[in-house]
Image (cartoon, rainbow, N blue to C red):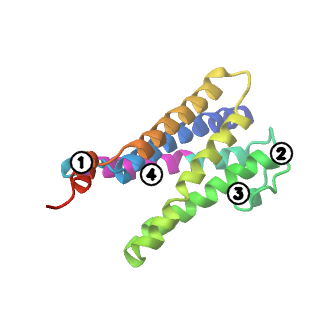
Amino acid sequence: MSNETLWYLSRATGLASITLLTLVVILGLLTSGRRRPFGERATIVMGLHRWVSLGMVAFLTTHIVTAIVETYVSIDWISLVIPFTSAYSPLWVGLGTLAFDVLVAVMVTSYWRHRMTERAWTAVHWLGYLMWPMAIAHGVALGTADQPLLRGTTLLCGAAGALALAWRLTTSYADRDRRRDILAGGWS
């Protein structure tokens, strides 16, 4: 495979990875929200969350391997796990490495979830909300500037995720106002 092909493959899989990661975050926000789906809908959303996560990991693995193997820029294998060690753009590659490290922690704890307390699993899983903006920053900073589709897609993913997060933080229980009125009425 030519170096140019690897470079294009790295960019394409990076774009697919950030798009799928954004979808995973949005689906995660839906399942953890105060208005989470119940019954069959919850099963469908959780299934999508898991399967899209697997797809994202496949694209991300290809993105990482092709970014290291291609020789247009110099990224060492050690930069895969130790942040800020890359000779090329150490800050931005380092953010991508940190996001990958968090992803590994989330994946491992999700696999071992049945052997962990719910509180411990949730604490690690919340790191996913830090991983996503690191990946967005990595994509915006290292995205190809002369290709507006690449950078624009990453920015669009950032906007979609931010809107989903705003929805998650501002939604309330459907009956919250009713419960508040009842409590304010006092007991007679």
Task: Please state which amino acid type lies under the numbered disc 3.
Answer: Leu
Q: Is residue 10 magenta?
A: no
Image x and y of residue 168, in percent:
42, 45
**Residue 137 - label:** none
Q: CA distance from mark 2 to mark 3?
A: 13 Å
Mark with earlier residue (2, 3): 3
What's the distance in space between the residues labelled 1 and 2, CA to CA? 53 Å
Query: Magenta stretch containing residue 54, yes or no?
Result: yes
N-term-proximal mark, 3 vs 1: 3
Using the image as rendered, state which of residue 33 and residue 114 is in the foreground: 33
Residue 101 against residue 43 in the figure, above or below: below
Sort mark 4 into few (<14), some (14-19) or many (20+) by Cα contacts within 10 Å: some
User: Which is more N-terminal, label 1 or label 4?
Assistant: 4
- Is residue 144 placed above or below 167 in the rendered structure? above
Q: Mark 2 or mark 4: which comes first in sequence?
A: 4
Residue 80 numbered mark, or none? 3
Which residue in the protein does label 4 denote?
Answer: 54
Instruction: Specify the principal SS of the magenta part.
Output: helix
Q: Residues within 10 Å of mark 2 (few under 14, many from 20)?
A: some
Spatial separation of the CA atoms under disc 2 and disc 4: 28 Å
Q: What is the quadrant of the N terminus in the image?
A: top right
SS for dot 4: helix
What are the residue bounds of the magenta stretch? Answer: 42-59
Give the labeled residue for mark 2: 88
Q: Residue at x 59, y 53 (%)?
A: 130
- Which circle, 1 or 2, is nearer the viewer? 1
